[in-house]
Structures are given as structure tokens and as C-alpha cells.
Image (cartoon, rainbow, N blue to C red):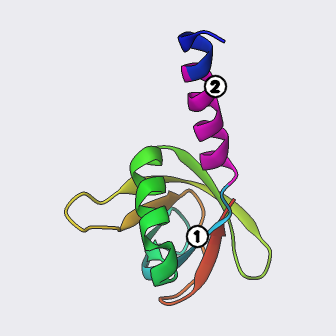
Amino acid sequence: MNRRLFLLGGLFQARITRRTTNLQIEVMEVFLSSDGPCALLVHHATEATRDEFSRWLRANSGSRVAFRLPNGTQLEGRVFRVSLCFGRGLILTRAPVTMKAKDRMTIV
């Protein structure tokens, strides 16, 4: 195996790991309008997942993300890292989401 194959294998593996994470997060604040887009300020759900969420957020800021609500509904949005607030993310959706502070959801 040459260096190129080794490095590409490492990048490919890291990408797969990031995509299949099923990471649970907690909503801190909800910004919504009754008929349009919604924004969710989120952070890690538990102290044990704080570092994992931080790494995931840095690697995926600006990306499309799918998440599952506690009732099983799956939604899509775009996640952004809030650079002035350590470990915080902002998820923008196109449709209103019925969530409140302290609710948890899973990134799929």
C-alpha cells in the first residue's frame, strides 16, 4: 500500500464516521415564524458528548443536516457553527419546528 492509498483511506473513513454519527443534541433556544423558516440554537446533550459535538460541528459547519425529533419525525436543515459561542450550533430549517428549549433531537 502506498502513501496515497493510506491517506485517502483515512480521509474516507473519517468522512464515513462523521456522516453516520447519530449524535444527540439539546435545543437551547428556538426562533420561529408561524409560516416559514425556523432557527434552533443547539449544543451538546450531555457533558460526555461535548467534545464529540464540538468536533462534528467544526467539520460540518455550513452543511446540510438531517435530524430526528423525539416523536420520530425527521427534518432537514443547514447547520452553522456559532464561532463566538464555544460549542454552539445554529440549525436553519425551511419549515416551522415544534420544539422548545431543553428538547433533545438526534443528528442522523
Label count reads: 2
Instruction: Give how far across and how far down residue 21 sits, in percent.
Output: 65, 57
Is residue 8 shown in magenta? yes
First along the sequence among labels 1 and 2: 2
Residue 36 shows in the view: yes
Q: Is residue 67 left or right of residue 100?
A: right
User: Quadrant of the rendered structure where residue 25 is?
Assistant: bottom right
On-image quarter of the N terminus: top right
Magenta segment: 7-20
Nearer mark to the viewer, of 1 and 2: 2
Q: Main secondary structure of the magenta part?
A: helix
Q: Residue at x 77, y 71 (%)?
A: 73
User: Quadrant of the rendered structure where residue 86 is?
Assistant: bottom left
Q: Which residue is mark 2?
A: 9
Q: Are marks 1 and 2 in contact (CB under 8 Å)?
A: no
Q: Residue at x 56, y 30 (%)?
A: 11
Q: Which residue is mark 1?
A: 96
On-image quarter of the C terminus: bottom right
Q: Is residue 10 left or right of residue 108?
A: left
Q: Residue at x 52, y 88 (%)?
A: 100
Q: Is residue 104 above or below residue 23?
A: below
- Viewer-closest of 17 and 89: 17
Instruction: Give how far across and how far down residue 52 sits, in percent.
Output: 49, 63
Q: Residue furthest left?
A: 84
Residue type, numbered disc 1: Pro
Q: Is residue 83 above or below residue 9?
A: below
Q: Residue furthest front?
A: 1
Instruction: Give how far across and how far down residue 55 sits, in percent.
Output: 43, 55
Residue 98 shows in the view: no
How far apart marks 1 and 2 lie (CA) works out to 40 Å
- Viewer-closest of 48 and 26: 48
